[in-house]
Image (tube, rainbow, N blue to C red):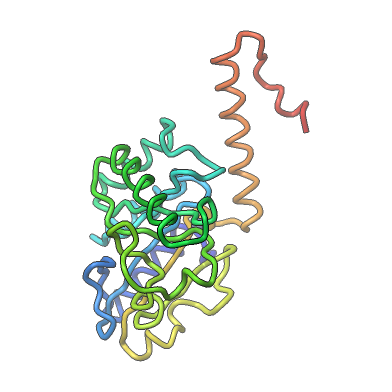
Amino acid sequence: MNDFSPGGYRALLEAFRVRGYEVRGFADAEPSQRHLILRHDLDITPEAALPLAQIEAEFSMRASYFVLVRGELYNAFATPQAQAIAALKTLGHEIGLHLDASLYADDDAAIAAGAAAECAALEVLAGVAVRTISFHRPVARLVGRTGPIAGRDNTYEARFVTEIGYCSDSAGGWHRGRPLDHPAISAGRALQLLTHPIWWRGTTPQAALDAHLADEVARLDAALAANCKVHTPGRARLVR
Ligand SMILES: [Zn+2]
């Protein structure tokens, strides 16, 4: 079985449970306890999150899903993405803001103002209070800082990446070590596990992106046909 598949994710959650880990949120995880924070950054599309979110719900685990409001790759307010976000909420998961701080001037006041505006938009969309922010591809200065941003916790605060262990599947692999091999696990301490749902489709990272690209082209093709009388569907293959 491919680790990076829904079945692999289920097995990983089971392995944490067998080791006595309990899933907690950012607000109530204790560094010295066997607490597991399940964080997902939705970089490519919220729809990719649903298989993992359903598995977590089966385990009665509440994860945190972070949504881009100003991303280049999806519109959170468009119907398929908004429906996916609503489904995550219905399954009981936290909805947080995934913030690309590079869109704002590199000072705390500008980033806080941008975060406040994006959180307000996301709260309207999701119908929940946004309590946590995660940075998208943060610069070094933003990792390990302390204090709230726009009144919210952020996932790269020192307590969440230093006091609590941190492990990520960036670029579709455990390039900095597998989660169960993290020193926090052998020490019986808390871990923040960041996964990006797009990588958990049971394929290579490139194949996952290829499939997503094909889906998006098909969707754009249909949307153009629905909105423009002059567009004949099926032309995407002609414009490579
Ligand atoms: Zn990101």
Q: x and y percent of residue 77 in the render?
A: 41, 34
- At x 34%, y 78%, the residue is 159
| Residue 57 vertical placement versus 179 (above, below) | above
Horizontal side of residue 122 vs 30, given as left or right: right
* Residue extending furthest toward the bottom: 187
- At x 48%, y 37%, the residue is 75
Q: Is residue 201 visible?
A: no
- At x 66%, y 14%, the residue is 231
Q: x and y percent of residue 190 in the render?
A: 32, 80
Q: Quadrant of residue 193?
A: bottom left
Q: x and y percent of residue 174 in the render?
A: 55, 73
Of residue 108 and residue 84, the one placed in the foreground of this image is: 108
Q: x and y percent of residue 16 in the render?
A: 34, 75
| Residue 98 vertical placement versus 85 (above, below) | below
Horizontal side of residue 173 vs 23, given as left or right: right
Number of labels in the image equals 0
